Image (cartoon, helix red, strand yellow):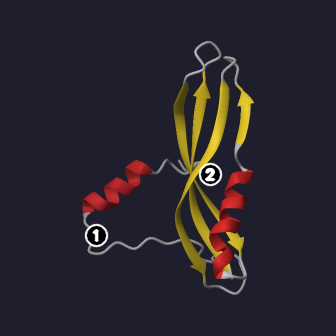
Amino acid sequence: MRYSARLLYESVLKNVLTQIPKVADGKQKLVVFECGEIEDLMAKLTRIAKRDELEFENVFSETVQWLFREVLEVQEIIGQKIEDGTEVFYRLWQDPNPVDFEYLRRTETETWCLPHQA
């Protein structure tokens, strides 16, 4: 079976002088994965998520760590194969109002990968 999952990460900065950690950024990531047994789903997803944890030194000599924090959501992908147009994520609202849609627009950044249209 195939699934999509929303994962939450945060970056933590550690100043070279103070060594005090500070949360700098957060990001959500949408991943697709396969899992044969429902019991193994969270264990496999956690392994996938932790693969993307990393640590490096930035130009200010601060240690930056991107850390996996939690699984926000998991959804089964119903399609037999993934091809153009396969739904891998959805969100339903009960009785949405204009404020709901405005919230979505505010919390998501502008799409960067589409060609600019004049």
- Disc tally is 2
Q: Residue at x 63, y 74 (%)?
A: 3
Q: Is residue 107 above or below residue 45?
A: above
Give neighbour class at mark 1: few <14, some 14-19, many 20+ (Cα, 10 Å): few
Q: Secondary structure at mark 1?
A: loop
* Residue 57: % across, % down: 73, 25
Circle number at residue 80: none
Q: Nearer the viewer, residue 26 or 90?
A: 26
* Residue 62: % across, % down: 66, 21
Q: Quadrant of residue 43?
A: bottom right
Q: Is residue 45 above or below residue 87?
A: above
Q: Secondary structure at mark 2?
A: loop
Question: Which residue is label 1 attached to?
Answer: 96
Lateral position of residue 102 relative to residue 45, left or right: left
Circle number at residue 115: 2
Q: Is residue 116 above or below residue 101?
A: above
C-alpha separation, residue under disc 1 versus residue under disc 2? 30 Å
Q: Residue furthest top?
A: 17
Q: Residue at x 30, y 75 (%)?
A: 94
Q: Nearer the viewer, residue 78 or 23?
A: 23
User: Identity of the amino acid at label 2?
Assistant: Pro
